């Protein structure tokens, strides 16, 4: 039985929760792992790959325990949907098994490490059907619901506490995911990505995407997030007013100030400056009164998340 599905602790109070950093970029650039299609879930197919993932998560568990903050453990399943998995030769049952293995791994790690001051939430991680950086193969909301229901239903049959969709670049896919999560009675968080101008790759404003997603789903999402963009790319969009700002609880920013197109072409990792990134999170928090879920995305690692926690955690 899920421990927190009926009451997510990161929504229930004001305690700071952290997540991990850029899983895929860490594995590729720091660990030297070949990761076709950024599909980290493929490592779960053998013991060596599973051990590598566990080592990665243990770094973040240690940071959470050190700072006495909560931790949202996101499964390594951002690419574990039908279209991307088929490129790696996964069939329907093999893919479902990989998603289940990811949750089982995190459940085991939580059982070994959770403490009263560091509650740990298990999240089934979803990614876009297409390219996270380009909104060039859009679905309508109904098609998105049907497509993502497969992975969400798999997570719902595990003891995962929630699902979270990252790098959403147009509202209709996010809306479909929320409907699919609601049909499974799964709490869901939606994280949009933006370009250097603060707008989604689709051209829609962040405010519009959040408001449309909430309007079309009855506000079912537990909260919204922003990921895969540097704080300097979206900080000006947060000067607006309105209730939509209180719906943003989480930030998982990139280390680099490069655009998505530039990151796509980069052959070397741009890991930015961990201390500067941590300070930028502190500034962003003043614009987002509900922000209490923080971590990193492309180019970030445990150093960045530690710096973020040091700037935000009390004491």
Image (spheres, rainbow, N blue to C red):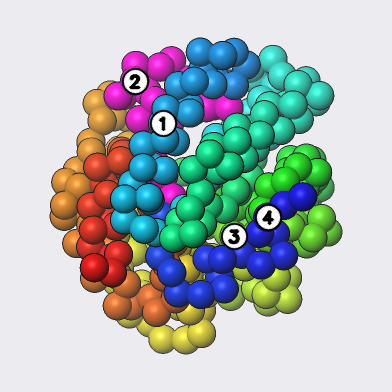
Q: Nearer the viewer, mark 4 or mark 3?
A: 4
Sequence-wise first label, 2 or 3: 2
Sequence-wise first label, 4 or 2: 4
Q: Which mark is residue 31?
A: 2
The reply to whether discs 2 and 1 touch (Cβ–Cβ < 8 Å) is yes
Q: Label 4, on which residue?
A: 3
Residue 106 visible to the viewer: no
Q: CA distance from mark 1 to mark 3?
A: 23 Å
Q: Is residue 13 above or below residue 4?
A: below
Q: Which of the pair 249/12 is nearer the observer?
A: 12
Q: Nearer the viewer, mark 2 or mark 1?
A: 1
Q: Which residues, given as a range, are shown in magenta?
A: 19-41
Image check: 153 left or right of 169? right
Sequence-wise first label, 4 or 3: 4
Residue 191 visible to the viewer: yes
Q: Callout 1: 10 Å neighbours few (<14), some, many (20+)?
A: some
Q: Is residue 112 above or below residue 19?
A: above
Sequence-wise first label, 4 or 1: 4
Looking at the rendered structure, the secondary structure element under dot 1 is: helix
Residue drawn where x is 30% and y is 64% of the image: 313
Q: Label 1, on which residue?
A: 56
Q: CA distance from mark 4 to mark 1?
A: 23 Å
Q: CA distance from mark 2 to mark 1?
A: 10 Å
Residue drawn where x is 52% and y is 27% of the image: 40
Q: Position of residue 121 (x, y in %)?
A: 57, 53
Q: Position of residue 254 (x, y in %)?
A: 32, 47
Is 308 magenta? The answer is: no
The reply to whether discs 4 and 1 touch (Cβ–Cβ < 8 Å) is no
């Amino acid at each position: 039985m899920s421990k927190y599905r009926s009451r997510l602790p990161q929504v229930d109070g004001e305690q700071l929760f952290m997540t991990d950093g850029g899983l895929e970029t860490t594995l590729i650039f720091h660990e030297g792992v070949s990761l076709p299609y950024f599909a980290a879930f493929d490592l779960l197919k053998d013991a060596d790959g599973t051990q590598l993932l566990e080592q990665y998560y243990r770094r973040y568990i240690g940071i959470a325990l050190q700072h006495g903050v909560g931790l949202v453990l996101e499964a390594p399943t951002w690419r574990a949907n039908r279209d991307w998995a088929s490129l790696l030769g996964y069939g329907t049952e093999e893919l479902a098994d990989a998603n289940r293995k990811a949750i089982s791994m995190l459940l085991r790690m939580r059982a070994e490490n959770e403490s009263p001051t560091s509650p740990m939430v298990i999240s089934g991680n979803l990614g876009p059907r297409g390219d996270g950086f380009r909104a060039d193969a859009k679905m309508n909301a109904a098609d998105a619901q049907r497509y993502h229901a497969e992975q969400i239903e798999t997570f719902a049959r595990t003891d995962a506490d929630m699902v979270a969709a990252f790098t959403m670049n147009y509202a209709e896919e996010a809306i479909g995911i929320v409907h699919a999560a609601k049909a499974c009675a799964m709490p869901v968080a939606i994280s949009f990505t933006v370009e250097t101008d603060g707008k989604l790759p689709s051209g829609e404003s962040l405010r519009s995407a959040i408001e449309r997603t909430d309007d079309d789903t009855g506000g079912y999402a537990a909260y919204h997030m922003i990921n895969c963009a540097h704080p300097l790319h979206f900080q000006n969009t947060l000067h607006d007013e309105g209730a939509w700002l209180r719906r943003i609880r989480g930030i998982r920013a990139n280390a680099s100030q490069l655009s998505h197109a530039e990151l796509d072409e980069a052959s070397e990792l741009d890991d930015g400056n961990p201390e500067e990134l941590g300070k930028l999170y502190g500034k962003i928090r003043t614009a987002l009164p509900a922000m209490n879920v923080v971590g990193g995305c492309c180019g970030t690692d445990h150093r960045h998340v530690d710096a973020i926690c040091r700037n935000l955690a009390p004491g």
